Amino acid sequence: MRIKSCMEINVSNLASNYQLLKEICPNNEALFMVKANAYGHGMVPIVKFAYFELGIKEFGCASIGEALRLREEIPNGEFEVYVFSDVNLDLQEAADIYLNNRIIPVLSNESNLKYFLEQEDFRYFPLCLKFNTGMNRLGLRLDRVDEVVKLIKASGRKSIYHLMSHFSSSSLSMIKNKRNLAQKENWRDLKSQLTAAGIEIDKSSLANSGAIEQKVGLEETHVRPGLMMYGPTSLLPQYSHLSCWEGKLISRLETTFINSFKVDRGTPIGYGATPCPTDGVV
Ligand SMILES: *Cc1c(COP(=O)(O)O)cnc(C)c1O
């Protein structure tokens, strides 16, 4: 803790951001992304408010540690928690945590998928899959859909509980940008391929903040807002006219200067004695 520094979180702004979100997409459920400590805002109090006061029932964490913390610190919360990033399903220790705490791993590679489908313990657990439609970070491969279908069917399942994908460029135009158009098309193809193979899709989500602001991806059951819930727009300034978002910032940082002084151009500053590029104030 730093004396005289304070970050203030205004939860009534979070409430009004959520209200605004509901106006943009009244027919979608929100899976609120609270990964990375709720984008630095303090995950536990944010989730408590979002669940108890706003009625949000689904939350997305990056790691199993974050998800477990929500279960431990909010034991009476009957919400769903998803882990998106380091799922670690190959570790028995991690598998036990999912099972014992009703935490849903988002499966984004075939080895995790195989493990999940083969384990008797996970037999009645929700199957949540994330495909790579162009983000090229995590996600099951589009050229392996047939294999994924085979694995699902061999396990005796007929449906996917929640199907997901993620946009790489929703801070740009969703209707003109080529990558976004390609991702949307890949997503459409993926869904029809799965459906044609007889796999039911119970829930689906595609849109993160930038897409939601442009009202794209709202035909799915869910949206997955992150940044917008904390206030800012995701669109780059030159695309701001495409956004309908008028969120309020939920945080305000107050701090003090510990030192300030005038310098001339060229004055060496700090490590490496880096020369100051202009006259000014440090
Ligand atoms: C972080 C994240 C989101 C939310 O992204 P924003 O751009 O902050 O809205 C949605 N889905 C996934 C899979 C994510 O990792």
Image: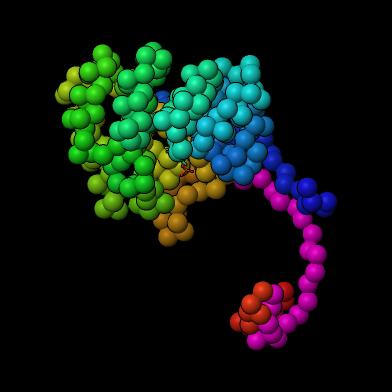
Residue 187, by quadrant, is top left
Q: Residue at horizontal 52%, vertical 23%? A: 97
**Camera-side residue: 16 or 225?**
225
- Position of residue 160 relative to residue 66, above or below, is above
Q: Is residue 138 magenta?
A: no
Q: Is residue 13 visible?
A: no
Q: Position of residue 194 (x, y in %)?
A: 21, 26
Regarding residue 119, the answer to whether it shows in the image is yes
Give percent across and percent down for residue 80.
50, 22
Q: Which segment did they paint magenta?
A: 248-270
Image quadrant of ligand 1 equals top left
The quarter of the picture where the C terminus appears is: bottom right
Picture coordinates of residue 25, whole percent (x, y): 43, 31
Please give left or right for residue 157 compared with residue 93 in the image: left
Q: How many marks?
A: 0
Which residue corresponds to the image point at 49% horizontal and 44% vertical from the top-left?
245
Q: Residue at x 30, y 33 (%)?
A: 110
Residue 191: name its quadrant: top left
Q: Nearer the viewer, residue 65 or 115?
A: 115
Colour scheme employed for the rendering of this structure = rainbow
Q: Nearer the viewer, residue 247 or 136?
A: 136
* Residue beneath the point at 46% across and 59% down: 237
Q: Is residue 250 magenta?
A: yes
Is 180 rendered above or below residue 128?
below
Work out whether 263 lies above or below 242. below
Work out whether 179 lies above or below 86: below
Q: Magenta stretch mostly in which secondary structure?
A: loop
Residue 159 image point, x, y percent:
29, 18
